[in-house]
Amino acid sequence: MELKDNREENSLRDFGHIGKQIIDIASLFYSRGWLFGTSGNLSAVLNETPLRIAITGSGLNKGKLDLSGLIAIDGDGNIIKGNKKVSSEADLHIAVIREMHAGSVFHTHSIWSTMISRRFLKDGGIVIGGYEMLKGLDSVRTHEHSEWIPIIENSQDMKTLSATVTVLLREHPEIHGFMLSGHGLYTWGKTIEEAERHVEVMEFLLEVFGRSMTGTDNIV
């Protein structure tokens, strides 16, 4: 019992440090047009057992966050620190963390991911290959790699949606991200730094994919 209490105390002590990292990255993503309005959410694991997660609160401008805009939740999505509302999408973060053993999960709302995820929903996803930038993804060693980015139909029923995500990740543990149709990108990493890199790589690839279609197809 004492060991568990110490872990809890240590994880919450890390909240400020990890929260500052999330705030800085959220501000950067906002400046790049990936988190406009109150869109998106970013999380990082504070403690694995029991699971404790720092995550941005719901309905906040991600370009103007401070520590009061973050909360800590447990593995069931219950708030254990902070007074902001927990996003319903926290269920998706928890699903990714559990299935992919992720240390951080980032959800962005870029223009390109929004348009592409609607245009290609019926195909179940898109494949991007042949770009050097692919080597920025974990375990990818060559530009000849083909990355499949699944697209899931969006829903306001987050319990059902998180179950769908769980099945997807179990069937395709090799993927680095997925999109919700008309909603945006989810990607992750073993660390905050890796998750940040994966967002930058995936958003680059999505923009290249979208721009390459300009004049040959209507992706809206």
Image: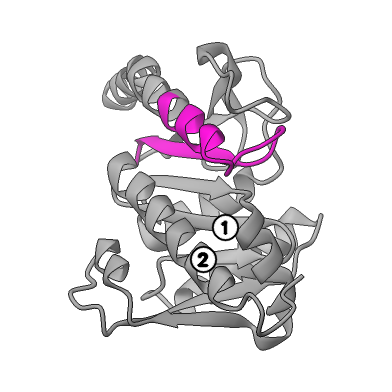
Q: Quadrant of residue 52?
A: top left
- Quadrant that contains the N terminus: top left
Q: Secondary structure at mark 2?
A: helix
| Count of picture labels | 2
Give the CA separation, mark 2 to mark 1: 10 Å
Instruction: Tell me where residue 114 appears, x and y as whole percent.
Output: 68, 60
Disc on the earlier residue, 2 or 1:
1
Instruction: Tell me where residue 184 appears, x and y as whole percent.
Output: 64, 56
Instruction: Tell me where residue 136 appears, x and y as whole percent.
Output: 27, 61
Tag 2–tag 1 contact (CB < 8 Å): yes
**Label annotation for residue 82:** none
Residue type for callout 1: Leu
Give the residues drawn in magenta, as a range: 24-48
Instruction: Tell me where residue 127 appears, x and y as whole percent.
Output: 48, 83
Q: Which residue is mark 1?
A: 185
Give the residue at x 66% y 25%: 61
**Label annotation for residue 206:** 2
